[in-house]
Image: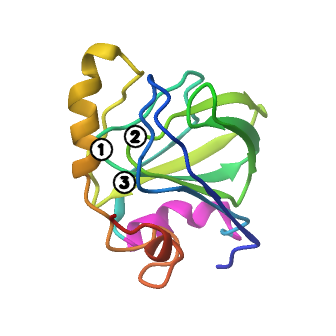
């Protein structure tokens, strides 16, 4: 496994999508040679509770866990960080690592687009859409999500361990 390119994105709270105040979104471009190896790779590195499907076409985030998404087929344009965030095109072999609280939404996808997702230690995930009444509790949840002990792709030697440090 290799990384052709590493991208980091920092997002601020936009008043609706909290994003993560301490941790960047990390994208590993072309990190997986074989799309079929995504789930096995994640699971070997203790990113569990895995699934294969797509990305919702509305802004959402998970306040109680981090998420890794590997593009196993096709390509898509995804908006990260809420309405004012970044539009990013991802394709087969790319891995997106989202810290708790980070908004994400599928804007466009090829007909064959599929991702495999997983969570550190198999954490259960919630789906939040930015409701104002949930805001006080999700801000606390996000701050309390522990850092993963392993990078979802590279285990104990991955870039995630360098860039995800508690402040």
**Figure quadrant of the C terminus:** bottom left
The residue tagged 3 is 119
Q: Earlier in the sequence, mark 3 or mark 2?
A: 2
In front of the other: 144 or 39: 144
The residue tagged 1 is 142
**Figure quadrant of the N terminus:** bottom right
Q: Earlier in the sequence, mark 1 or mark 3?
A: 3
In front of the other: 75 or 40: 75
Q: Residues within 10 Å of mark 3 (few under 14, many from 20)?
A: many
* Residue at horizontal 65 percent and vertical 51 percent from the top: 71
Q: Is residue 1 above or below residue 152?
A: below
In front of the other: 67 or 118: 67
Question: Which label was assigned to residue 101?
Answer: 2
Image spot of residue 65 (x, y percent): 32, 48
Can residue 34 be found in the magenta stretch?
Answer: yes
Part of the protein shown in magenta: 33-45
* Residue at horizontal 26 percent and vertical 21 percent from the top: 134
Q: Are marks 1 and 3 in contact (CB under 8 Å)?
A: no
User: Going by the image, does 113 lie left or right of 13?
Assistant: right
Q: CA distance from mark 2 to mark 1?
A: 6 Å
Can residue 120 be found in the magenta stretch?
Answer: no
């Amino acid at each position: 496994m290799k990384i052709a390119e590493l991208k980091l994105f920092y997002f601020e709270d936009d008043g609706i999508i909290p994003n993560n105040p301490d941790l960047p979104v990390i994208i590993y471009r072309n990190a997986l040679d074989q799309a079929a190896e995504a789930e096995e790779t994640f699971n070997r590195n203790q990113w569990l509770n895995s699934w294969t499907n797509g990305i919702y076409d509305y802004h959402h985030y998970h306040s109680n866990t981090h998420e890794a998404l590997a593009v196993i087929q096709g390509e898509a344009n995804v908006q990260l960080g809420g309405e004012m965030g970044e539009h990013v095109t991802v394709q087969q072999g790319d891995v997106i690592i989202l810290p708790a609280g980070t908004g994400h939404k599928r804007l466009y996808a090829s007909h064959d687009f599929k991702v495999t997702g997983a969570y550190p230690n198999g954490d259960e995930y919630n789906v939040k859409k930015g409701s104002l009444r949930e805001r006080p509790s999700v801000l606390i949840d996000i701050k309390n999500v522990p850092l993963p002990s392993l990078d979802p792709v590279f285990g104990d030697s991955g870039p995630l361990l360098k860039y995800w440090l508690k402040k």
